[in-house]
Amino acid sequence: MRLTRFTDLALRVLMRLAVDRGDSPTTRDVAATMQVPYTHTAKVVARLQHLGLVEARRGRGGGLALTPAGHAASVGGVVRELEGADDVVECEGATPCPLRSACVLRGALRRAQEAFFAALDPLTVDDLVTAPTGPLLLGITGGPPAGRQAGGPGS
């Protein structure tokens, strides 16, 4: 199973915010740290806000913060939510597979997908930033950004 780039970035954003140093980074700060476009990061942050995992505060002193639900969120649950419940293979698409009525592979792939999610279920976002990941993440994020300007949500 391969995660979409959106889900990958969402997990990295959650990890960055879970390493709480009280600096409330902006979306631009997080995008720069993760070396991804701001527009992609803004879309991810908006979705994480909608899910109640991230809070974005506007204006001077604003920025992003992980909510208590975000800290305790199951990684498997987050991945399920972001990836959706679609089958790994498309059997019923525009050109339906002629084997779909008697296919053993479809069920096996569904079980494999559920096993993938189940392996992530016990992990919380906070678990992802225990040593050695958390200290490494702190090292690459540097200190709080200087001279941050007010702007959009968590700009």
Image (cartoon, rainbow, N blue to C red):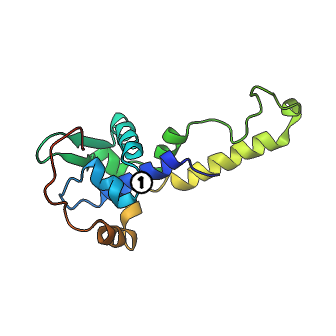
* Helix, strand or loop at mark 1: loop
> In terms of image quadrants, where is residue 30?
bottom left
Q: Residue at x 84, y 41 (%)?
A: 104
Percent of width and height locating residue 149: 15, 48
Q: Residue at x 70, y 46 (%)?
A: 111
Q: Is residue 123 above or below residue 41?
A: below
Image position of 144 (left or right of 129) = left
> In terms of image quadrants, where is residue 52?
top left
In the image, farthest residue toward the left: 60
User: In terms of depth relative to the viewer, which is nearer, 74 or 144?
Assistant: 144
Residue 50 visible at all: yes
User: In terms of depth relative to the viewer, which is nearer, 99 or 144?
Assistant: 144
Percent of width and height locating residue 80: 53, 42
Percent of width and height locating residue 79: 51, 46
User: In terms of depth relative to the viewer, which is nearer, 106 or 43?
Assistant: 43
Image position of 2 (left or right of 153) = right
Q: Residue at x 50, y 40 (%)?
A: 82
Q: Is residue 102 above or below residue 35?
A: above
Which amino acid does the dot numbered 1 rest on? Val
Q: Which residue is mark 1?
A: 36
Image position of 58 (left or right of 8) = left
Image position of 71 (left or right of 119) = left
Q: Residue at x 28, y 55 (%)?
A: 29
Which class describes the residues within 10 Å of circle 1: few (<14), some (14-19), or many (20+)? Answer: few
- Quarter that holds the C terminus: top left
